[in-house]
Image: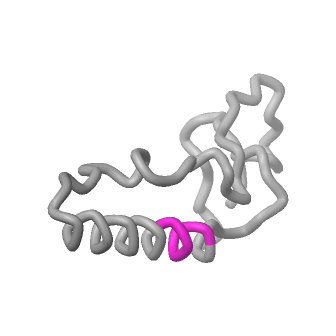
Amino acid sequence: MSRSVRKTKIFGITTAETEKQDKRRWNRTFRKVCKKLIRLEKDPPIKIQGVTDVWDGAKDGKRYYRQATKKDMRR
């Protein structure tokens, strides 16, 4: 992977490596709410955003970093 470099200067704003635990928690909550609403014969939400807030996760999004050096662009 010595030639692996980023194509754009976009970086994540985080110290977390992964959002795996957050995604598992969100999907479990989504499935639980859907099952409960189906039992009550109501319409379940179509998207996960209807149940959880994706901005509660460990990663906070991405930003464009204009002054990125060659070292920053390495993976």
Asked whether 64 or 41 is in front, the reply is 41
Provide residue 52's location: percent of width, then percent of height. Answer: 51, 53
Provide residue 34's location: percent of width, then percent of height. Answer: 30, 66
Q: Magenta segment: does it hold 23?
A: yes
**Main secondary-structure element of the magenta-colored stretch:** helix
- The quarter of the picture where residue 33 lies is bottom left
Q: Magenta segment: does it hold 24?
A: yes
Identified at 66% across, 34% down, the residue is: 9
Asked whether 22 or 42 is in front, the reply is 42
Asked whether 1 or 51 is in front, the reply is 51
Identified at 31% across, 50% down, the residue is: 47
Provide residue 27's location: percent of width, then percent of height. Answer: 43, 70
- The quarter of the picture where residue 7 lies is top right
Provide residue 37's location: percent of width, then percent of height. Answer: 27, 63
Asked whether 54 or 37 is in front, the reply is 37
Determine whether, in the image, residue 68 is placed left or right of residue 32.
right
28 over 26 or under it: above or below: below
Q: How many marks?
A: 0
Q: Which residues are magenta?
A: 22-26
Q: Give the quarter of the figure containing the N terminus.
A: bottom right
